[in-house]
Image (tube, helix red, strand yellow):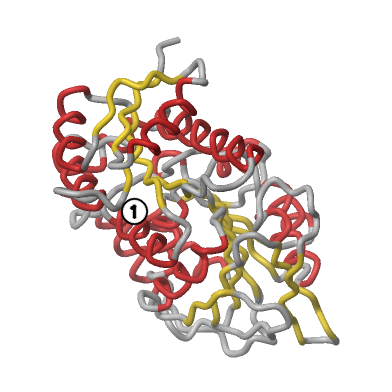
């Protein structure tokens, strides 16, 4: 098996050394180059043609956002942003994802050896995952140029679905709640889906995406400025409101609890403490399935692993509906594949039609 060729772009000699050591500890990765700023990174990317690039954001001469944009224009390559755990770092990271970056890791390297090991596992895991989908990024240039020329019938279906009148009331809505899960590639996919949902829907939404605590608030704020429905980071004890999109805070587990006949509230805690992901899609979806039996819908978007599979299973077992993103439009075809292979997807759709399918199915 050929090694995955990685180019490291970072202006910090310390970070270049740490990332290089993390990657060289893996038997599946080869560091083919190290660049000290964005300008050098672009030159080396074009010359070395790596399989994956790790990209710092704040750099002299040419920053990570500009370098990412140039690389994606000239030679689309999977890029993983290396971001600081700050609100400013989060906002810059989302801009990089808009410019075509595949995903990000946070460089919180002042922590324990165990935390460093987790960062190493996350970085290597993401590099391996996105490298398998290199053809997807290569096709992005063509896809971006032809984005306006969507298949006519698909465009009509999308238009028809998104102009459907909203249901009359939360109490009579067939699908009262939609739970959405995503991981690698999730921020860009969620932005695509949620921004296309029409205003006036009376369904409530809960979104769980694998993201650190410092990022989820900034992401909710960003989505709120792009979507027709209100978006906010979920808070413990708040009432679930029709037509609102709640984003699960990073670092904890978000659950929906019923109080009385028709009142539903957000419950945030740290259970289960041994969960691999916080937030965990399975935890979110399981709570939704139990609170809204037969009236909930699960949606799984791009991501590594199989988080969300069991939550989708319970939603389906309790009479709800399920929808998964197709392989062709996933940044990483892991979470949707797990759901589809288990026979748990009622429908499978490309990313550009997920919003339309949600409206149709609720």
Q: Relative to residue 150, is residue 122 drawn left or right?
A: right
Report the front residue among 236 and 16. 16
Quadrant of residue 221 within the rendered picture: bottom left
Give the x, y percent position of residue 252.
68, 62
* Residue 123 to residue 250: above or below: above
Quadrant of residue 316 within the rendered picture: bottom right
Name the quadrant of the N terminus. top left
What residue does disc 1 label? 97
Give the x, y percent position of residue 233.
56, 74
How many numbered discs, if any?
1
Give the x, y percent position of residue 188.
39, 56
Element at badge 1? helix
- Residue at x 62% of width, y 64% of height: 179
Q: Residues within 10 Å of mark 1 (few under 14, many from 20)?
A: many
Report the front residue among 327 and 125. 125
Q: Is residue 315 visible?
A: yes
Give the x, y percent position of residue 335.
58, 43
Residue sticking out furthest to the bottom: 168
* Residue 176 to residue 183: above or below: below
- Residue at x 63% of width, y 37% of height: 113
Q: Is residue 146 visible?
A: no
Residue sticking out furthest to the top: 1
Report the front residue among 135 and 314. 135
* Residue 37 to residue 257: above or below: above
- Residue at x 75% of width, y 71% of height: 292
Q: Relative to residue 217, is residue 296 drawn left or right?
A: right
- Residue at x 80% of width, y 55% of height: 272
Q: Relative to residue 59, is residue 354 drawn left or right?
A: right
């Amino acid at each position: 098996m050929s090694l995955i060729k990685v180019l490291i772009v970072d202006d910090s000699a310390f970070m270049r050394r740490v990332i290089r050591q993390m990657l060289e500890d893996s038997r599946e990765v080869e560091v083919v180059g190290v660049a000290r700023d964005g300008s050098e990174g672009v030159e080396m990317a074009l010359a070395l043609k790596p399989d994956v690039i790790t990209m710092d954001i704040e750099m002299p001469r040419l920053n990570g956002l500009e370098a990412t944009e140039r690389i994606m224009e000239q030679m689309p390559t999977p890029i993983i942003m290396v971001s600081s755990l700050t609100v400013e770092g989060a906002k810059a990271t989302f801009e990089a994802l808009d410019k075509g970056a595949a995903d990000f890791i946070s460089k919180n390297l002042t922590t324990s050896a165990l935390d460093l090991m987790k960062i190493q596992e996350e970085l290597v895991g993401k590099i391996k995952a996105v490298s398998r989908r290199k053809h997807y990024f290569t096709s992005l240039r063509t896809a971006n140029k032809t984005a306006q020329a969507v298949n006519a019938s698909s465009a009509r279906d999308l238009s028809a679905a998104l102009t459907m009148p909203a249901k009359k009331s939360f109490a009579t809505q067939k699908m009262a709640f939609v739970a959405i899960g995503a991981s690698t590639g999730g921020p860009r996919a969620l932005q695509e889906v949620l921004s296309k949902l029409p205003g006036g829907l009376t369904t409530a939404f809960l979104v769980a995406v694998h993201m650190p605590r410092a990022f989820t608030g900034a992401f909710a704020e960003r989505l709120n400025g792009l979507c027709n429905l209100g978006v906010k980071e979920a808070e413990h004890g708040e009432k679930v409101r029709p037509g609102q999109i709640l984003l699960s805070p990073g670092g904890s587990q978000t659950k929906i609890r019923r109080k009385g006949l028709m009142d539903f509230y957000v419950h945030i805690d740290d259970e289960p403490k041994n969960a691999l992901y916080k937030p965990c899609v399975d935890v979110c979806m399981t709570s939704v399935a139990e609170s809204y039996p037969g009236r909930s819908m699960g949606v799984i978007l791009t991501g590594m692993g199989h988080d969300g599979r069991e939550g989708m299973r319970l939603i389906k077992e309790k009479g709800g509906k399920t929808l998964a993103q197709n392989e062709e439009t996933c940044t990483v075809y892991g979470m949707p594949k797990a759901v589809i292979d288990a026979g748990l997807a009622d429908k499978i759709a490309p990313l550009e039609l997920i919003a339309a399918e949600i409206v149709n199915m609720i």
